[in-house]
Image: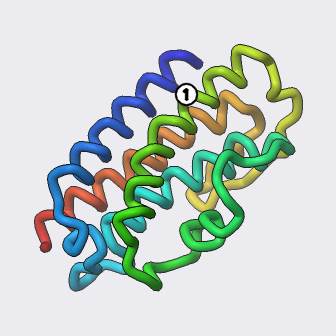
Amino acid sequence: MKYQLEVTRTNRRILEKMINSIPLETLNRVPEGFSNSIIWNIAHVVVTQQLLVYKLSGLPTLVSDEMIERYRKGTKTEHAVTEEELEMVKTLLHSTIDQTEKDMDANVFENYQEYPTSTGFVLKSLADAVAFNNFHEGIHLGYIMAMKKAL
């Protein structure tokens, strides 16, 4: 799974470059034809990884319940992200993956609750969750690239 985590890290570095190259006002804007902002999509991938890997393993997440409620599947952009929130998201992009790797090495993931995704994949293990998460993050990276062009 080390390779899968490196794929995640590569995607997260791309997302961080976008955060650093786009003004906050633009990150918060929802382009015509889209449901959410760029920053919502970035925070959403952080939250989703936590739900897929930690929550479905019966472990506490590394992000707050408030963040989960704001950015989980089915939510939409409802507020402008502040500079402080943006910095938190930037930190979480990397710290959550670093901690996931440490937790994998420490064998803290002992159980996994099977989960049928909305795309039709059924996740049956931690390995499935990590692989699917990369697929999910790739979808959102594509959205973000299209949104950037639309703004």
**Residue, x 64% and y 64% (percent of image)?**
68
Q: Quadrant of the C terminus?
A: bottom left
Q: Which residue is mark 1?
A: 98
> With respect to residue 30, does 91 lie above or below?
above
The x and y percentages for residue 7 are 41, 28
**Residue, x 38% and y 46% (percent of image)?**
138
Q: Secondary structure at mark 1?
A: helix
**Residue, x 87% and y 27% (percent of image)?**
110
Q: Quadrant of residue 32?
A: bottom left
Q: Is residue 103 left or right of residue 93?
A: right
The x and y percentages for residue 118 are 61, 62
Label 1: few (<14), some or many (≥20) within 10 Å?
Answer: some
Q: Is residue 115 left or right of residue 80?
A: right
> With respect to residue 108, does 49 lie above or below?
below
The x and y percentages for residue 122 are 70, 46
User: Toward the viewer: 124 or 69?
Assistant: 69
> With respect to residue 16, does 43 lie above or below?
below
**Residue, x 62% and y 30% (percent of image)?**
99
Q: Quadrant of the N terminus?
A: top right
